[in-house]
Image (cartoon, grey):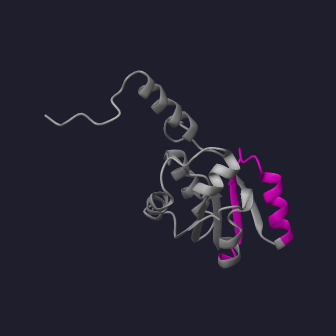
Amino acid sequence: MKVMVSGTYDLLHAGHIQFFKDARALGDYLVVTFCSAPNLLLYKGYEASMPDDNKQLLLESIRYIDKVYRGSDDGGIFDFLPAFEIEKPDILAVTEDDRHKEEKKEFCDSRGVKFVVLPKRNLVTQVSSFGIAKKVTEQVLKGVPAERPPLL
């Protein structure tokens, strides 16, 4: 069975990896669509922390993921639609804190695709992309050098 997930994945962390592992366990092939930089700016109102080609390479290197797509630039919460139409997944999986579960469930119901809500499992210290960004910002404001000091 083919499983699809989509998300921002702007600052990749262990919670994302656990989500990919759990989603992959629902089937035998996992497709991941990530939010493009233009859609991120349009949809969430902030710039991506890294270029899309960097994000794509990171996601492609994760062993639980079989295929990675960059989401459409103006698709909002349905930026995964072009990849969805190509891949025709059996399952669309989201996390329990997905703010658009209802819309995505209706989308799946209208297409005969199983919709699965996965619980967040924190097998390591819980972090979030926002929390990582906040901590980095705090460090910069405290005077942490913007450039790495030379090695001795």
Question: Which quadrant of the view contains residue 30?
Answer: bottom right
Q: Horizontally, is 1 left or right of 128 in the view?
A: right
Whether residue 18 appears in magenta in the rendering, the answer is no
Total numbered badges shown on the rendered structure: 0
Q: For the magenta stretch, what is the residue range?
A: 87-110
> Where residue 99 appears, x then y in whole percent?
75, 46
Which residue is at the front of the view, 134 or 115? 134
Q: Position of residue 145 (x, y in %)?
A: 33, 29
Residue 74 in the figure: left or right of residue 108: left
> Looking at this rendering, what residue extends furthest in the left direction?
152
Q: Residue, x 49% and y 46% (percent of image)? A: 14
Assign the N terminus to one quadrant of the image. bottom right
From what the image shows, is residue 75 above or below residue 66? above
Whole-percent x, y for residue 149 in the image: 24, 33
Specify the quadrant of the image occupied by residue 38: bottom right
The image shows residue 31, relative to residue 41, as above or below, that is below
Write down the quadrant of residue 93 in the picture: bottom right
Of 136 and 102, which appears nearest the observer? 136
Query: Is 145 or 8 nearer to us in this picture?
Result: 145
Instruction: Decide whether residue 99 is among the magenta residues.
Output: yes
Q: Residue at x 71, y 72 (%)?
A: 90
Q: Which residue lies at the image location 82% right of the left edge and 72% below the top edge?
A: 111
Quadrant where the image shows the C terminus: top left
| Depicted 149 relative to depicted 52: above or below | above
Residue 42 appears at what percent x and percent y? Answer: 68, 51
